[in-house]
Amino acid sequence: MNHVALVTEAIDVAALLARVSSPTVGAIASFLGTVRNVNDNRAVTGIEYSAYEEMAEREMRAIVAEAAAQVDGVPPRIAIEHRLGELSLGDVSVAIAVSHARRAPALDACRYVIEELKKRVPIWKREHYADGSRAWVDNRNTVGAVELPGVIG
Amino acid sequence: MRVGLRLFASYADALGTRSLDVTLADGATVRDALAYVRALPGASALPPAPLMAVNAEYAPLDQPLSHGDEVALIPPVAGG
């Protein structure tokens, strides 16, 4: 079973990997996003994540279905968790695990999921800086222009 | 008709609220809901074409609304 969740506690990466593990798979690809100590040359001390939770879960499920549909034959098994709330440096903000019989579909699906998540899933972050200030930041610099067909009009 | 409006992140900060219940004319579209928000104090901070959602799905501006819909303005996302 695929798995999508927003969580407020530390993500249990081993448990996430276990969700996609089985004797029929020969590869498990994983991606972890973590809180970095600098952004745009500013010293970051932490990040606060929030979401439109119903929509974020719905978009993540849609992305999982798209990733699975791109694989011929047996679909990959996919698990995603994104953390919300106050995170410290080094904390895991998002974890993705994808298993398949072969490595190429697992790696491809894992990459697809994180790239689409960064473009589409309604999650926001406010960075906290060493000087005590805070600012909303977004992914436009890292994923390029976001085009959602039929939305802009 | 009555619809619920939801604001998040920087948009919620700009308008000073996270949710509103508003009355729109029958036949109103997403564009009309956005126009309502644009008339509120603080709305000058919104971009020219914010992404919109209806009932937790991205929606075009010409999508018709129904009584009880939840319309959201979606700021540039930052997950990952």
Image (tube, grey):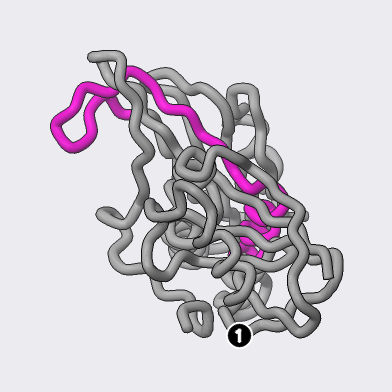
Protein chain holding label 1: B
Task: Work out which residue is located at the far top of the displayed protein and give it.
Answer: A131
Give percent across and percent down for residue B32: 62, 74
Which one is in front, A51 or A81? A51
Residue closer to the observer: B2 or A129: B2
Q: Is residue A19 magenta?
A: no
Q: Is residue B56 above or below residue A91?
A: below
- What residue do we see at 44% from left, 61% from top? A119
Secondary element at tag 1? loop
Where residue A125 appears, as percent x and y from the top left, is 44, 37
Q: Can residue A86 be seen from the camera position used here?
A: yes
For the N terminus of chain B, the image quarter is bottom right
Q: Residue A106 vs residue B55: left or right?
A: left
Say if B48 sits above or below B11 in the image. Answer: below
Question: Residue A50 colored magenta?
Answer: yes
Q: Nearer the viewer, residue A110 or A132?
A: A132
Residue at position x 60%, y 40% in the image:
B17
**Which residue is found at the position 70% from the left and 43% from the top?**
A19
| Residue position marked by numbered label 1 in the rendering | B62
The answer to which image quadrant residue A61 occupies is bottom right
Q: Position of residue A118 (x, y in %)?
A: 44, 55
Q: Which quadrant of the figure contains the C terminus of chain B?
A: top left
Q: Is residue A34 above or below residue A103?
A: above
Mark 1: give few (<14), some (14-19) or many (20+) Cα within 10 Å.
some
- Answer yes or no: is residue A30 visible: no
Q: Quadrant of residue A140?
A: bottom left
- Provide the residue span drawn in magenta: A36-64
Task: Say which amino acid is labelled 1.
Answer: Asp
Which residue is at a point 37% across and 68% down the rendered structure image? B48
Q: Is residue A102 above or below residue A46?
A: below
Q: As rendered, which of B60 and A116 lies closer to the eye?
A: B60
Q: Position of residue A35 (x, y in %)?
A: 37, 29
